[in-house]
Amino acid sequence: MAVYTDVSDEDLAAFVALYDIGDTLALKGIAEGVENSNFLLHTTSGYFILTLYEKRVNPADLPFFLELMRHLAARGISCPQPIAARSGAMLGELAGRPAAIISFLDGMWVRRPKREHCAELGEALARFHLAGADFAGQRPNTLSVDSWRPLLGASLDQADTVVPGLAAELTAELDHLESRWPTGLPAGVIHADLFPDNVFFIGERLSGLIDFYFACNDAFAYDVAICLNAWCFEPDLSFNVTKARALLNGYRQVRDFTDAEFAALPLLARGSALRFLLTRLHDWLRVPPGALVTPKDPREYLRKLRFHQGVSTASDYGLAP
Ligand SMILES: Nc1ncnc2c1ncn2[C@@H]1O[C@H](COP(=O)(O)OP(=O)(O)O)[C@@H](O)[C@H]1O
Ligand SMILES: N[C@@H](CCOP(=O)(O)O)C(=O)O
């Protein structure tokens, strides 16, 4: 359960009073997510999500994320909307943290995505990429290749306690990726964390996207690679080619995927696996005392990384250019 910061009744009442959303009826910590503290806020006007932004969020980036949610909704992407206080501000402070109230999005995330979900996801990802084309905000990907060495460095001395030999294995992988990381691919605003728990469905139909707090400017194909890793492996960590094809074909129905993007996929998938492995490893070794959070297992992403190390072209995934 991701609640790092508790909110007192008095502080909550004073915060909610800044908004035109009625009086608080209940506040419940949400039993999902690992990055921020999220609460379901029930007021006399309905349901909202209250988020307190935690460790990994740079407060200077919050206007980018919140404006992006508005921009996307204006272009037909279903996603939560920041609620402005009476003053017009979308951001405030609560319990010593930057905080925002956003609208509640109906739907459920799918624990065991099927081929149909992957196809819908591919389409939605491409629509997201197109919708971001005229977004004025800019935010570099602070969790791309340049950040991985310092991130690994922070966990290097303890990495072998998680998996023997991990420090050397990840150092060698980083050497490989740093010297080959692709540049010049088609780029724009990407979600950068579009895991199943950030995509809501009502039945088989995708009902919306949430959690834009890693969004940034980067290669579109890197976002596709993140989704291949997050959606197309089975619980036994075998790669499901049928799901990968469905995802890529869904994507291509909406946005062209160039030959250069296709060729770069194996490397981007390796990089994406390393990126999530490193943040998970970092957090696995540092669960804050008293936090209500279930850290995500870095070993899952080590298995995915090792799978991609055995792939040399995207056709080896069973995908066609
Ligand atoms: N706008 C929303 N509408 C409905 N549920 C939401 C919304 N935002 C977050 N949630 C719920 O909170 C959980 C954690 O949110 P998320 O943004 O993924 O957390 P984190 O900030 O830790 O990444 C989600 O899996 C979902 O259950
Ligand atoms: N998706 C990341 C962690 C951040 O996820 P969220 O649950 O807070 O959206 C991972 O799986 O490592």
Image (cartoon, helix red, strand yellow):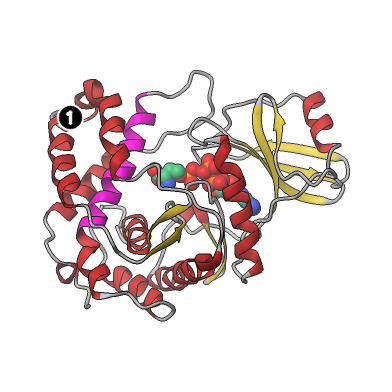
Q: Nearer the viewer, residue 234 or 66?
A: 66
The spot of residue 156 in percent (x, y) is: 23, 25
Q: Is residue 268 magenta?
A: yes
- Where residue 183 sits, quadrant-wise, is bottom left
In the image, taking residue 270 as reference, residue 313 lies left or right, namely: left
Q: Secondary structure at mark 1?
A: helix
Q: Nearer the viewer, residue 63 or 151?
A: 63
- Where residue 99 sits, quadrant-wise, is top right
Query: Can residue 32 be seen in this snapshot?
Result: no
Is the N terminus in the top left, top right, bottom left or bottom right quadrant? top right
Above or below, 65 against 175 in this view is below
Query: Can residue 96 be seen in this snapshot?
Result: yes
In the image, taking residue 172 as reference, residue 156 lies left or right, namely: right
Which residue is the site of mark 1?
167
Magenta stretch, main secondary structure, is helix
Above or below, 314 against 26 in this view is below
Segment tinted magenta in the rendering = 267-285
The spot of residue 130 in percent (x, y) is: 49, 71
Seen at 23% across and 27% down, the residue is 159
Q: Is residue 37 magenta?
A: no
- Where residue 135 sits, quadrant-wise, is bottom right
Toward the top, the furthest residue is 289
